[in-house]
Image (spheres, rainbow, N blue to C red):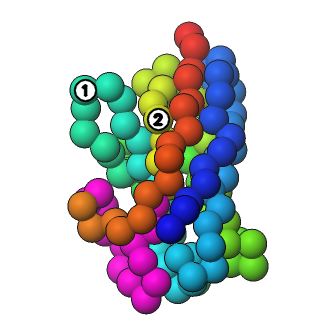
Amino acid sequence: VQLQASGGGLVQAGGSLRLSCVTSARTFSNSVMGWFRQTPGKERDFVAAISWAGGSPSYSNSLKGRFTISRSNAENTVYLQMNNLEPEDTAVYYCAARGSGITVINRAPSQWRFWGQGTLVTVSS
């Protein structure tokens, strides 16, 4: 199973980035999709997740409404729009899928079955 994340890069504080993650229809279908992030020496943290239907996405409380998760079921792709980026957002961002047929959002990384390779986001001050 492959999840291919892209869109990371270097941006100045206050800027925006849009991450994308594409996977197979088999992995994407009827699965909760999400984003996590990790910095060196720290645990992987939940960022956002969205159900198959797209309603009521879930976000980390620390994001202060700056990030928006969305998905295109026709393109088997999940997105993370990140606005007003802060240096503290610097991390490797991972997309993940809970698995086909799993419809409940869970913030624990251990509950997610499939992971992408990560894309680095660096926010300079």
Q: Amino acid at mark 1?
A: Gly
Residue 69 in the image: state x and y as whole percent: 58, 58
In depth, the one of 64 and 102 nearer the eye is 102
The residue most toward the top is 125
**Highlighted magenta segment, given as a residue range:** 96-109
Residue 12 horizontal side relative to residue 60, left or right: right
Which residue lies at the image location 43% right of the left edge and 24% below the top edge? 88
Can residue 63 be seen in the rendering of this structure?
Answer: no
Residue located at (40% from left, 72% from top): 98
Residue 19 makes an appearance in the image: yes
Q: Tell me the SS state at disc 2.
A: strand
Q: Which mark is residue 119?
A: none
Where is residue 41? Give x, y as percent.
Answer: 25, 26
Nearest the viewer among 47 and 98 is 98
In the picture of the structure, the residue carrying the numbered disc 2 is 92
**Type of the residue with mark 2:** Val
**Label 1, on which residue?**
41
Q: Residue at x 66, y 45 (%)?
A: 6
Is residue 73 found left or right of 104 in the rendered image?
A: right
Image quadrant in which you'd find residue 123? top right
Please tell me how crowded label 1 is: few (under 14), some (14-19), or many (20+) other residues with Cα within 10 Å: few
**Is residue 33 on the magenta stretch?**
no
Above/below status of 42 relative to 13: below
Q: What is the x, y in percent for residue 75?
A: 74, 72
Q: Quadrant of residue 18?
A: top right
Task: Give the answer, above or below, for where 121 lies relative to 53.
Answer: above
Whether the magenta-drawn stretch holds residue 108 is answered as yes
Residue occupying the point 36% across, 80% down = 104
Measure the alpha-carbon separation of dots 2 and 1.
Answer: 12 Å
Label 1: state its secondary structure: loop
Left or right of 40? Residue 18 is right
Residue sitting nearer the eye, 29 or 32: 29
